[in-house]
Image (tube, coloured by chain):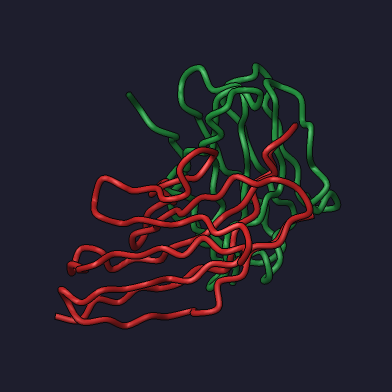
């Protein structure tokens, strides 16, 4: 079974430039998450989708970050314009329906962003 | 709101020695607890989890963790570590009811010394 797929794995951009990350979750997983992991820190939730609906985006910096999951499957996270402080690993994850008892989140390998 | 504290940012240990990675949590409701492992340049992988039942949970590669409600702890242990256990370990907590938002600790880097 294929895991969570993310691209690109690595991206280096200049500040003020835009960047986009793509994620394809595990087949059949309704819940999709975007996390940001700063160096030396644990992952912090940016946004959570249930199918195509963003049900928790309280931690998403909406002035420069946007996300979409148009058909309830794959998702895109965009930053425009990027700032130096956005350098981090952006992790996509998915899980089965939240009402199930097994609440396991499956992570992708991450997209490593460096803003210079 | 819940939170997770991992007091040790780095833990060096010699190969074949035992190790304990500490995790304490705070929550006003019942919780689920998790340990995730992150190998270099990879995403997080679930190592083990406590949902209910027995307070001692085990992973397939020899790690175990014990849920201690009175001490609000979920420490991770292994009696004999291997070089391949070198990684960063994250403790995480979620509320057991409704939407189970998962909160991660800051991680502990386990360095196994040959």
Q: Position of residue A47 (x, y in %)?
A: 72, 42
Quarter-wise, where is residue A108 in the image?
Answer: top left
Q: Is A22 on the left or on the right of B86, as rendered?
A: right
Q: Position of residue A13 (x, y in %)?
A: 57, 61
Q: Residue at x 75, y 32 (%)?
A: B98
- In the image, the chain rendered in red is B
In this rendering, would B33 be left or right of A65?
left
Instruction: Say whether residue A63 is left or right of residue A33.
Output: right
Q: Going 54% across and 33% down the picture, which residue do you hit? A: A94
Q: Is residue B71 visible?
A: yes
The correct choice, above or below, for A77 with respect to B27 in the image is: above
- x and y, in percent, of residue A97 in the image: 61, 22
The foreground one among B20 and B44 is: B20
The image quarter containing residue A61 is: bottom right
Image quarter (top left, top right, bottom left or bottom right) of the C terminus of chain B? bottom left
What residue is rendered at 20% in x and 63% in y?
B84
Q: Is residue B10 above or below residue B3?
A: below
x, y percent for residue A59? 79, 52
For residue A76, which quarter of the picture? top right
Residue located at (55% from left, 78% from top):
B7
Q: Quadrant of the N terminus of chain B?
A: bottom right
Location of residue B6 with respect to A24 vertically, above or below: below
Work out whether residue A37 can be spotted.
Answer: no
What is the count of numbered marks? 0
Q: Who is closer to the viewer here, A104 or A107? A: A104
Chain letter, green: A
Front residue of A67 and A50: A50
């Amino acid at each position: 079974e294929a895991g969570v797929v993310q691209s690109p794995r690595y991206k280096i951009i200049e500040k003020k430039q835009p960047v986009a990350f793509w994620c394809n979750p595990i087949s059949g997983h309704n819940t999709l998450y975007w996390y940001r992991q700063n160096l030396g820190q644990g992952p912090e939730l940016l946004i959570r989708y249930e199918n195509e609906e963003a049900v928790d985006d309280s931690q998403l910096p909406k002035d420069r970050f946007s996300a979409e999951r148009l058909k309830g499957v794959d998702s895109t996270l965009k930053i425009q314009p990027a700032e130096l402080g956005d350098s981090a690993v952006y992790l996509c994850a998915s899980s089965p329906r939240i009402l199930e008892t097994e609440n396991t989140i499956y992570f992708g390998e991450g997209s490593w962003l460096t803003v210079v | 709101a819940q939170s997770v504290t991992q007091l040790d940012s780095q833990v060096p240990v010699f190969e074949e020695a035992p190790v304990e990675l500490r995790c304490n949590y705070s929550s006003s409701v019942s919780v689920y607890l998790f340990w995730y492992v992150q190998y270099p340049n990879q995403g997080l992988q679930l190592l083990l989890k406590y949902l209910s039942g027995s307070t001692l949970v085990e992973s397939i590669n020899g790690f175990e963790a014990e849920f201690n409600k009175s001490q609000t702890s979920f420490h991770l242990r292994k009696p004999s570590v291997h070089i391949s256990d070198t990684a960063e370990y994250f403790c995480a907590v979620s509320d057991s009811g409704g939407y189970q938002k998962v909160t991660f600790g800051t991680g502990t880097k386990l360095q196994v010394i040959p």
